[in-house]
């Protein structure tokens, strides 16, 4: 019994489904400092208050690894428990923006954030994570890889990922046989259609960029014994794009701001 209790403490996996709203930004290179400062000093504090009130499960901002000379891509996201909590959050979260603006050491920052935010937005996605497996306690996910694909049956894609890959990944994590520390599978519920080139995704979490590169260039232990054909058939054209994101700042479910 003691061994079981110790094992649970050592590997406190948390898996759950959730709705996530994600925004995509293209920021001129000479304005990245303004954008990142407003996200860190204003939006993060707003979302921290919202999380402490139980309105959201979390928030984060990430910067794309690898960029063009003139633009840098970013994403921000908010996670919700269900559609009712999402609706409640959007109806209530506005008060925290004004409240937080008054608390800033640099009030002008919130004004700039309001003015510039809309000009940076190039799109948004509404996602449903059928499963998200958090990293073990004490592990800081600094980088995430978004694997994007098109599936004729998104629900089946998630089903196969959960049935085949999820238990396999749990074993790898428990035996410390992988550099990957977290995992999730999601369906894009809006916008829909083939115009957007992807409608499903998986998210892999890592502590460092070196861990990502080592994983790419190494064989996954036991993968040859795994029947991944049902997964492959669920997205026959393979990955449309695999993007590495550096997680700059986030807010957890307790409202703690983590950089």
Image (spheres, grey):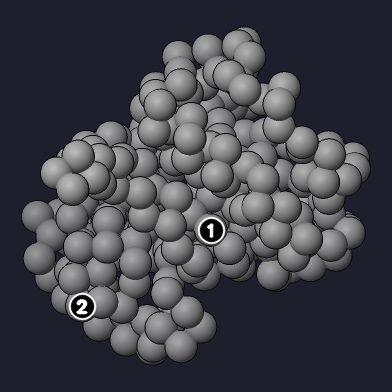
Q: x%, y% of residue 91?
A: 38, 89
| Residue 67 seen anywhere in this rendered image of the structure | yes
Tell me the quadrant of the picture where the C terminus can be found.
top left
Question: In the rendering, at what x and y percent does residue 151 appear?
Answer: 84, 54
Q: Is residue 70 left or right of residue 240?
A: left
Q: Mark 2 falls on what kind of element?
A: loop
Q: Which residue is mark 1?
A: 131
168 with respect to 161 (left or right): left
Residue 35 vertical placement versus 89 (above, below): above
Residue 100 higher or lower than 183, as above or below = below
Is 199 on the left or on the right of 175, as rendered? Answer: right
Query: Residue under circle 2?
Result: 53
- Residue 219: image quadrant is top right
| Residue 19 screen position, x and y as percent | 52, 70
Q: Which mark is residue 253?
A: none
Q: Are the two marked residues, 1 and 2, in contact with CB atoms closer than 8 angstroms?
A: no
């Amino acid at each position: 019994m003691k061994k079981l209790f110790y094992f649970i403490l050592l590997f406190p996996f948390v898996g759950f489904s959730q709705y996530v709203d994600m925004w995509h930004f293209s920021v001129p290179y000479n304005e990245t400092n303004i954008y990142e400062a407003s996200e860190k000093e204003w939006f993060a504090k707003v979302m921290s208050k919202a999380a402490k009130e139980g309105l959201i499960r979390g928030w984060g901002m990430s910067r794309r690894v690898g960029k063009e000379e003139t633009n840098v891509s970013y994403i921000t996201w908010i996670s919700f428990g269900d559609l009712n909590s999402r609706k409640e959050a959007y109806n209530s979260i506005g008060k925290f923006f004004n409240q937080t603006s008054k608390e800033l050491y640099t009030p002008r920052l919130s004004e700039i954030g309001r003015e510039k935010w809309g000009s940076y937005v190039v799109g948004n996605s509404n996602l449903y994570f059928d499963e998200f497996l958090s990293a073990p306690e004490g592990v800081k996910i600094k980088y995430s890889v978004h694997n994007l694909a098109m599936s004729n049956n998104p629900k089946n894609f998630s089903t196969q990922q959960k049935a085949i890959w999820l238990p396999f990944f749990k074993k790898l994590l428990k035996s410390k046989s992988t550099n990957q520390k977290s995992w999730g599978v999601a369906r894009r519920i809006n916008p829909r259609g083939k115009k957007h080139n992807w409608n499903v995704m998986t998210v892999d979490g890592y502590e460092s960029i070196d861990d990502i590169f080592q994983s790419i260039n190494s064989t996954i232990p036991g993968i040859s014994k795994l029947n991944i054909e049902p997964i492959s058939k669920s997205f026959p054209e393979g990955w449309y794009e695999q993007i590495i994101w550096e997680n700059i700042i986030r807010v957890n479910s307790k409202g703690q701001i983590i950089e």
